[in-house]
Structure formats: C-alpha cells, structure tokens
Image (tube, rainbow, N blue to C red):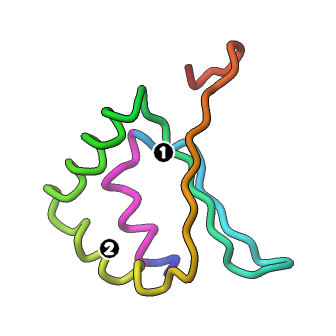
Amino acid sequence: WGNNWARGVTYRKDDAVAGFFSQIGQLYVVHHIWKYENLFSRKETRESAWRKPGWDECVAYTVPLIMQMRSRWMSSNDFSPIR
C-alpha cells in the first residue's frame, strides 16, 4: 500500500497538508489531510486527479485494501498558516 500511495500522492501534492500511518497500536491506520478552499474546490481537485495518467492505477491498487473510511471537513483557526 505504502509504495503505491507514495507514487499516487504526487498527483495531488499541491493540496496535501499531511499524511501518516500508525505502526503502533492499531496498525496501518492511515490519515491524509488535504486543503481546499471550499467543497466545490474539493470536487474540482478530486475530478482533475482522474485526468492525470497514473492516478487510476494508484486507486486501483490502494482502494481494495481499505476496510473502513471516514471523511471530515475541518476549518483552520485564524492563526493557521494554512489559511
């Protein structure tokens, strides 16, 4: 999983804030944090990834390994450099 996703994340590196996974406790719990201006921007960014050669291959190899997935929308604090 890690090798495939390491290649795949390069297709969306401009929106990446953080990505990490656990090797202690519950193993291989993966967290990705992406930044978007709004939900429309999120939709456009995700759709544009499908137009890049190789993204589909990344998804094809990594999605079958997902056992559970949750999404959350967070907003940054006023002091956040991500704003």
Magenta span contains residue 10: yes
Which residue is drawn at the image coordinates 25% and 77% (left, top)?
57
Residue identified by numbered label 2: 58
Q: Quadrant of residue 74?
A: top right
**Which class describes the residues within 10 Å of circle 1: few (<14), some (14-19), or many (20+)?**
some
What amino acid is found at the position of numbered circle 1 in the picture? Answer: Ala
Which of these two is toward me, 5 or 41?
41
Which of these two is toward me, 52 or 65?
65
Magenta span contains residue 73: no
Which residue is drawn at the image coordinates 32% and 73% (left, top)?
58
Q: Which of marks 1 and 2 is nearer the N terminus?
A: 1
Q: Is residue 44 left or right of residue 74?
A: left
Q: Distance between the residues labelled 1 and 2?
A: 16 Å
Residue identified by numbered label 1: 16
Which residue is drawn at the image coordinates 48% and 36% (left, top)?
35
- Most extreme residue toward the top is 78
Q: Where is residue 79 in the image (x, y as percent from the top left)?
A: 71, 14
**Span colored in magenta:** 4-14
What amino acid is found at the position of numbered circle 2 in the picture? Answer: Cys
* Above or below, comparing residue 7 to residue 40 in the picture: below
Point out which mark residue 76 bears.
Answer: none
Q: Main secondary structure of the magenta part?
A: helix
Which of these two is toward me, 3 or 27?
27
Q: Is mark 2 on a helix, strand or loop?
A: helix
Q: Where is residue 28 in the image (x, y as percent from the top left)?
A: 67, 78
Q: Is residue 11 left or right of residue 66?
A: left
